[in-house]
Image (tube, helix red, strand yellow):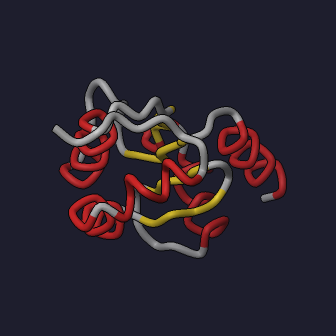
Amino acid sequence: MSDVNTAIENEIKSQDVVVFMKGTPQMPQCGFSGQVVQILNYLGVPFKGVNVLADQNIREGIKAYSNWPTIPQIYVKGEFVGGCDITREMFQSGELQTFLAEKGVPVKSAA
C-alpha cells in the first residue's frame, strides 16, 4: 500500500492542480469527471488528469489516501479540495476562483 501512496503523492506533487478522474481530460469517462474538466477548462486552469481506470491500485488507493469515497478528486498545491459537487459549488459561488488565485494558480477572469 505504501508504494501506491508514494505514487499518489508523486502525482499530487507533479503539478499545481491534479485531478484523479475516470478517463482523461480530453475524454472523461464519467459525467462527474467531465464536469470538473469543464470547470477547470472554463477557468483556464492548467491541470493534470490521472486516469484511475488505467490502474486499479491508484483507483482504490486514492480513496484511502484522501479518505474520500468517490472519484473525481481534485488537489491544489498538494491540498485535497474535494470531488465534483464541492468543486461545482465552489465554482458557482466564486470561491474556487478565489481559492485558486490565493494558492498562486493562474485563473482566467470570468467573462
Q: Residue 98: where, in percent of width, then height?
A: 43, 57
Quadrant of the snapshot with the C terminus? top left
Q: Residue at the location (74% across, 48% down)?
A: 9
* Closer to the camera in the image, 54 or 27: 27
Q: Is residue 58 left or right of residue 106?
A: right
* Closer to the camera in the image, 41 or 21: 41
In the rendered image, the residue lying farthest to the top is 26
State the count of labels: 0
Please say if 51 is above or below 86: above
Q: Residue at the location (51% across, 73% down)?
A: 68
- The quadrant in which residue 89 appears is bottom left
- The quadrant in which residue 1 appears is bottom right
Please say if 30 is above or below 48: below
Q: Residue at the location (63% across, 34% down)?
A: 15
* Closer to the camera in the image, 101 or 54: 101
Q: Residue 79: where, in percent of width, then height?
A: 64, 59
Please say if 28 is above or below 35: above
Q: Is residue 101 left or right of residue 97?
A: right
Q: Residue 69: where, in percent of width, then height?
A: 46, 73
- The quadrant in which residue 34 appears is top left
